[in-house]
Amino acid sequence: MEATTLSFENLHNHGELFANLLRARRQSFIEKNKWDLPEALGMEYDQYDTPASRWVAVHDQAGTVLAGIRLTPTTARCGIYTYMIRDAQRGLLDSIPQDLLYVEAPVADHVWESSRVFVSSACPARDRRRVHLSLMHEMSRAARDLGAAQLLGLIPANWPRWAPRCGLNAAAAGRVMEIDGIANQCVSIDLTAKLH
């Protein structure tokens, strides 16, 4: 099992891994969760998959993606879009409630958003905890390398059960809300203790 952080600068070094990540996202979000999201060529994508973002993939040696996450700077801009949580708060996304955060969505170099978090249903149950730990470790490492001191994410509301086991210093940043039948919540992850 490996964890790789992808960017538009290094995609060429990793063969089909980025396409496999988007295929695994399609399986997780469109097929399994039944979310109405854009797709093409068997891959899920959206307006936040731009050169500003990074993608973490946990995968095996053959390139089969077991888990993934996207990191986007809160300073990103592409047309009318910035980052998912902020755009939801601004009323640009119909599928996510505007009152998802307790405060105004930040725009700061040291804050990045984590989104599109998944562990593939193809991941064997015996490996899920190890895969999840690897995903959170690589997410934190990549975010720190990018200069992030804080991550803001919209994730399943069961995060208090697993975040401490992954070594994450996370706190609620918004109310629990149901999105497409799944309880979700915005969380803030403090990376300052990991900067040393």
Image (cartoon, rainbow, N blue to C red):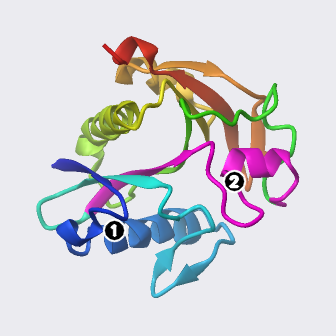
Residue 131 lies in quadrant: top left
Residue 77 bears which disc, if any? none
Residue 90 is one of the magenta-drawn residues: yes
Check the image and report above or below for 32 versus 87: below
Which residue is at 75% across, 45% downward? 86
Q: Which residues are magenta?
A: 65-94
**Residue annotated with mark 1:** 18
Disc 1 from disc 2: Cα separation: 22 Å
Which residue is at 62% across, 76% downward? 38
In front: mark 1 or mark 2? 2
Q: Earlier in the sequence, mark 1 or mark 2?
A: 1
Which residue is at 60% across, 25% downward? 188
- Mark 1 Cα shell of 10 Å, populated few (<14), some (14-19), many (≥20): many
Q: Nearer the viewer, residue 150 or 185?
A: 150
Image quarter of the C terminus: top left
Check the image and report above or below for 18 versus 74: below
Residue 105: x, y in percent? 75, 35
Residue 66 is one of the magenta-drawn residues: yes
